[in-house]
Image (cartoon, grey):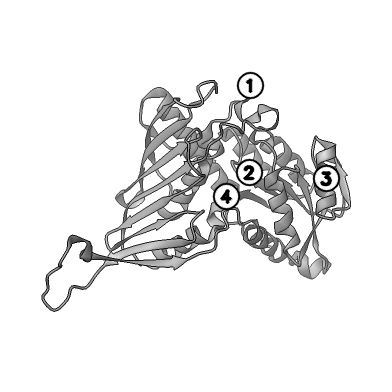
Amino acid sequence: MRSMKSETGRKLGFGIISASYMAMDHVRGVKANKHAEVKAICDIDLAKAERVAAEFFIQDYYADYTELLKRDDIDVIIVSTPDQLHAEMTIAALEAGKHVLCEKPMALTIEECKQMIDASERTGKKLMVGQICRYAPGFALAKKLIDDGEIGELFYVESEYAHDYSEAPGVGNWRIDPVRLRHPVLGGGCHAVDLLRWIAGNPYEVTAYANRKVLQSWPVDDCTIAIMRFPQDVIGKVMVSVGCKRAYTMRSVFYGNQGTIIVDNTSPTLTIYKDRISGDTGLFNDVNDQTISISHPVNIRSHNTIDEIKEFVDILLNDDQVRTDGVEGASTAAVCLAIVESASTNQSVRIQYDF
């Protein structure tokens, strides 16, 4: 197949479903790309869609997302809606002949994930799942350092998703919808889970514990901790709290037998600790002298839609493989759902990757 770029010589047209804060980040990402342009945006709140369209000089806006799917000048749909709608909208867009960038989490159930993967394969249209933390500069640098052997062999990895949702149940209270319950581990904790999967591989067993001490009126636990076993005898931990009283953070630590990396998607530095060579005496004056820390400056772009969309555009123009495709998105969802199951049953759960 020839690339879309060589066939058309035009910019890829994007349609964005939602006028939310995250959707506006996606608009910025598209506008930063010389090979792409936003053709239209939609939101069930038409006045909101109109305001965003005016702010970003987008010509057309709608209340019904199916209007985007009818347009021949739209090649790509970005689904940035509440999690409960991801599967329905993604499948509809794929079947309408559009490529799709679907926000994380991919869907609320494994069955829905499978249906989305099937729709992508059946239509021949590409599906990308927005695991945005893979594009955060600090995490991308950590991945490169680990792959390059800078801290030796991994033995323990951890990440946390700490984000106070107290005043953020979502428009229409979608985060606490009792009909289609969205667990914080899947909805937000998928960031931390996907980061560890990306760096340490697919965990195969999880034991998790949860409680609800802060958001007691919510129908889901607000704090969960999961202990996981990864390939190569690596162990790891994910902590998710959506009621904690602190600034948003995804502080992550990677321990190797030759060093340690500490990194956060909201901090301007990545710190790596490594063995220090002793002085002429061969003795350390203080226990702290056994290691040396090196700080690497990084850009703070926790939601780096510019690089995410650049990668997707390049993939589409050159007909390349999507790295965060449906199988990757489903794999992260599978781990998250196994964590929820383990916490609710008080039993360890073996994670299945059958998509």
Q: Looking at the picture, which amino acid does disc 1 mark?
A: Val
Q: Which residue is mark 3?
A: 51
Horizontal relation, residue 154 to residue 6: left or right: left
Of tags 1 and 3, the one toward the viewer is: 3
Q: CA distance from mark 4 to mark 1?
A: 26 Å
Give residue 30's mark.
Answer: none
x and y percentages locating residue 295 in the rendered image: 40, 66
The numbered dot on residue 131 is 4
Give SS at disc 3. helix
* Residue 208, horizontal then vertical, whole percent: 38, 32
Amino acid at the residue labelled 4: Gln
Q: Which residue is mark 1?
A: 179
Q: How many marks?
A: 4
Residue 271: x %, y % from top left: 39, 62
Q: CA distance from mark 4 to mark 2?
A: 16 Å
Q: Is residue 214 left or right of residue 181?
A: left
Q: CA distance from mark 4 to mark 3?
A: 27 Å
Task: Characterize the local packing of mark 1: few (<14), some (14-19) or many (20 or more) Cα atoms within 10 angstroms.
Answer: few
Q: Is disc 2 surrounded by few (<14), some (14 to 19) or many (20+) residues within 10 Å?
A: many
Is 340 above or below relative to 116? above
Element type at mark 1: loop
Q: CA distance from mark 3 to mark 2?
A: 34 Å
Pick the quarter of the image with the C terminus: top right
Q: Which residue is mark 2?
A: 117
Q: Position of residue 331 (x, y in %)?
A: 51, 43
> How far is disc 1 from disc 2 in space, using C-alphas?
24 Å
Q: Is residue 15 above or below residue 32?
A: above
Mark 1–mark 2 CB contact (< 8 Å): no
Nearer-N-terminus badge (1/3): 3
Q: Gap between marks 1 and 3, in whole Å?
A: 31 Å
Q: Amino acid at mark 2?
A: Ile
Is residue 146 or residue 291 the one in the foreground?
291
